[in-house]
Image (cartoon, helix red, strand yellow):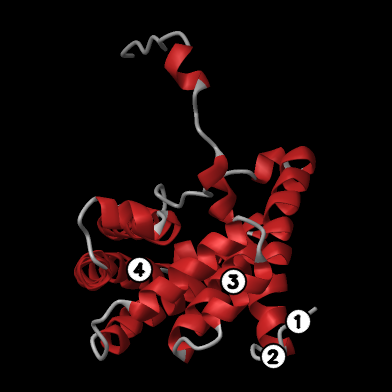
Amino acid sequence: MVNSDVGGLNYLLFAVLPYMAVTVMFVGSVIRYDREQYSWKTGSSQMLESKQLRKGSIAFHIGILAIFLGHFVGLLTPSGVWHALGVSAPTKQLVAMGAGGLFGLVCLYGMVILIKRRLTNPRVRATSTSMDIVILLVLCLQLLLGLGSIFVSAGHLDGEEMLKLMSWAQNIVSFDPQTAVVSIAPVHWIYKLHILLGMVIFVLFPFSRLVHMLSVPLKYIGRNYQVVRRG
């Protein structure tokens, strides 16, 4: 039964939708890999233009990987572990704001370069699909929301809102959606929008080039060397 304090819409968006989005991501990815293996790639346009790609891609990947790791560790590590390590909620919030802001700006720098290149370079634009452009713009919007949330966090440095976000994430992972939605209900709308757009990215994942994130080229480690002779 849905708790009347959290409302049916909150329950749908933050207790039901997360499982639906993750299901679409994994099932869709499996189906795509089974049926369209030749499309399972980054679709690199390096041969069309490499200078801007290199500059934007390095910054983007450094930033996005650091942000992903920070979210994963920060949200899913139980509060008791942080307490045992001597890290208080306010301290954790300050670290998250500082590191998130730094790597967010690095990622944004790379993202702007990649979007400009994708939209303004005639050859790159001609080989881009609609999904290539959509996923870049959605990721950029998600990044801007994350950076915007830092200013909201600066208005309350007690760490309480972060604890609520942690509780939501951990209870979703532990399949306790009722407790999860009670935790998320009172937080600021910018955090909620950030979460919802994250679910949109999960849904778009199997239909975009993001699927290459699931591929680890282990076979290259043990393959024979290629012998290249000069002509």
Q: CA distance from mark 3 to mark 2?
A: 13 Å
Q: Position of residue 4 (x, y in %)?
A: 71, 90
Mark 4 or 2 closer to N-term?
A: 2
The quarter holding residue 129 reads bottom right
Secondary structure found at label 1? loop
Given contact means CB atoms under 8 Å apart, are the residues at marks 4 and 1 in contact? no
Q: Amino acid at mark 4?
A: Met
Q: Residue at x 78, y 46 (%)?
A: 31
Q: State the residue position of label 2.
A: 7
Query: Which is in the foreground here, disc 4 or disc 1?
Result: 1
Q: CA distance from mark 1 to mark 3?
A: 12 Å
Q: Amino acid at mark 1?
A: Val
Q: Position of residue 12 (x, y in %)?
A: 72, 80
Given contact means CB atoms under 8 Å apart, are the residues at marks 1 and 2 in contact? yes
Mark 1 or 3 closer to N-term?
A: 1
Mark 3 or 2 closer to N-term?
A: 2
The quarter holding residue 21 reads bottom right
Q: State the residue position of label 1.
A: 2
Q: Position of residue 110 (x, y in %)?
A: 29, 65
10 Å neighbourhood of mark 3: few (<14), some, or many (≥20)? many
Q: Amino acid at mark 3?
A: Ala
Q: CA distance from mark 4 to mark 1?
A: 40 Å
Q: Amino acid at mark 2?
A: Gly
Q: State the residue position of label 3.
A: 180
